[in-house]
Amino acid sequence: MDEKTLRIRNEYIAYVRFEKNYSVHTVTEYERDVDEFLEFLKTEGILTIESITYQEARLFASRLYDRELSRASISRKISSVRSFFRFANARYDINDTAFRLLHHPKKEERLPAFFYAEELDKLFEACLGEKPRDHRDRALLELLYATGIRVSELTSICLGDIDNDLGIVRVMGKGRKERYVPFGSLAQSAIEQYIEISRPLLMKTVKHDRLFVNLRGGPLTERGVRHILDAIVERACIESNVYPHMLRHTFATHLLSAGADMRTVQELLGHSDLSSTQIYTHTTKEHLRRTYMNTHPRA
């Protein structure tokens, strides 16, 4: 690949990391997608992005389909490369028509998975130990379910972001958008016990202000949260495929099922577009339909 293309690539990654303030996970995905596209060009003998035509863009998309990736993955990769070309066009006047003309695959209609009340009870029961890690895990689980925040948002929370008296947490969302999310008495109690008793024991001699810490006292990472949830699920003997984002789905689904208005749920979740929140109305309707079909005598 020529030096100019590599320079644009590096500037683009710096742009999404520092100017757009995307999360580490999002930046990693953008970087991987763009590098995958540049590797594709290399195999096709194309040395510079300045010569890309619609035909090459179509060929790249067809290679993604050949790998039998999900439509969501293909759509994301095309979006990443399109964003890369948009940046190259703005900074270096590189023609971005090829990917502007390329259509996304139609998204799969997949309803978000969520926990039922019985499953949630099992998860919380699995955190009833009295060791410092049990207090941390319970506080972590309570806060995720009580607020519906993303795992990336959870791991960035500092002690000063929590007002446990008022039951409010300050959250830094996507694009560095700040919002305040309330949480209830059960989360308050778990967080208070964790901060006052268990966090100092886990911290030992380490010093930082992140709310959640690992067993060595360092700031808890997104991967660490997934590892903790996997362990809780195993102790709770829940066999379904579980991932941290399910707690966010559960938060939204349970609020809407109980009569919360969609605009409030949108604000709590930090969605910029109401359509992102509307998917949960389909989930609640499907839940009602299944309950009806399973329980009504003449269904």
Image (cartoon, rainbow, N blue to C red):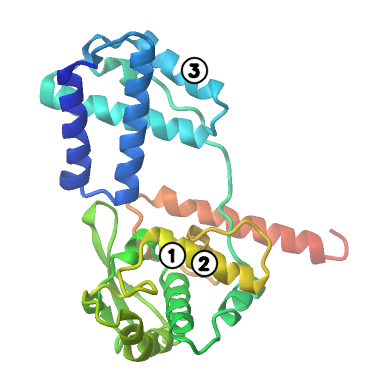
Regarding residue 266, the answer to whether it shows in the image is no
Amino acid beneath label 1: Val
Q: Picture quarter containing residue 126?
A: bottom right
- Element class at badge 3: helix
Q: Residue at x 34, y 83 (%)?
A: 199
Across and down, in percent, residue 270 comes to 34, 59
Q: Relative to 85, is 17 above or below?
A: below
Residues at discs 2 and 3 in contact (Cβ within 8 Å)? no
User: Separation of disc 1 and disc 3 at Cα?
Assistant: 36 Å
Q: Which residue is mark 1?
A: 225
Q: Nearer the viewer, residue 183 or 68?
A: 68
Q: Earlier in the sequence, mark 1 or mark 3?
A: 3
Does label 2 or label 3 sit earlier along the sequence?
A: 3
Q: Quadrant of residue 13?
A: top left
Instruction: Tell me: residue 32, above or below residue 129.
Output: above
The residue identified by callout 2 is 229
Q: Secondary structure at mark 2?
A: helix
